[in-house]
Image: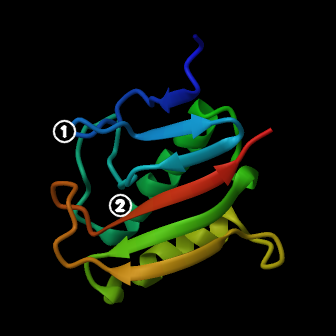
Amino acid sequence: MAKRRTVIKVPGLTHRTPISLGAKVGNIVHSAPIYGLDVEQHVLPADPAEQAAHMFKNIRRFMEAAGGTIDDIVHVQLFLKDFKYRDAVDVEWVKMWPDEDDRPSRHAVSEPEIRGGGAIFGVEIMAVVN
């Protein structure tokens, strides 16, 4: 019997727990938290702007591994250690989706005990790929 679920793997982005980075069933894709890890240096930058830039690069990597693009993302759940860091995310958000009439929905929540080994923020995404 063929497996219904496909696990999404991205080189350099893994979790330390027994969960996948994401999964796809049919054309629906959902991620576990994606952080701003610099996958080439294997570090999580301390600077919020740099961490945000890497997080958005990792969103692209995840979507490519899932067989889609950022245009397939329908919702982004943003987790912030503190809301004061939202501006760093917003800068990269507008770079990724410059057209205000063509952006996924987003909801931000405070997560003071965010995991991710020094992560200031993280995202989970939901997408529909063709």
Residue drawn at (31%, 36%), measured in percent from left and top?
14
> Which class describes the residues within 10 Å of circle 1: few (<14), some (14-19), or many (20+)?
few
Which residue is label 2 attached to?
Answer: 51
**SS label for mark 1:** loop
Residue drawn at (23%, 45%), measured in percent from left and top?
43
Q: Nearer the viewer, residue 12 or 4?
A: 4
Task: Name the quadrant of the N terminus.
Answer: top right
Front: mark 2 or 1: 1
Residue drawn at (73%, 70%), measured in percent from left and top?
103
Please provide percent x and percent y for residue 32. Answer: 40, 50
Q: Is residue 58 above or below residue 92?
A: above
Dot 2 or dot 1: first in sequence order is 1
> Which class describes the residues within 10 Å of circle 2: few (<14), some (14-19), or many (20+)?
many
Colour mode? rainbow
Based on the displayed image, in which of its 4 quarters is residue 85 positioned? bottom left
Amino acid type indicated by mark 2 = Gln
As drawn, is 78 to the left or to the right of 91? left
As drawn, is 75 to the left or to the right of 107? right
Which residue is label 1 attached to?
Answer: 16
Residue drawn at (60%, 34%), measured in percent from left and top?
66
Based on the displayed image, in which of its 4 quarters is residue 12 positioned? top left
Instruction: Work out how far the residue at label 2 is from the one at label 1, CA to CA, in angstroms.
Output: 19 Å
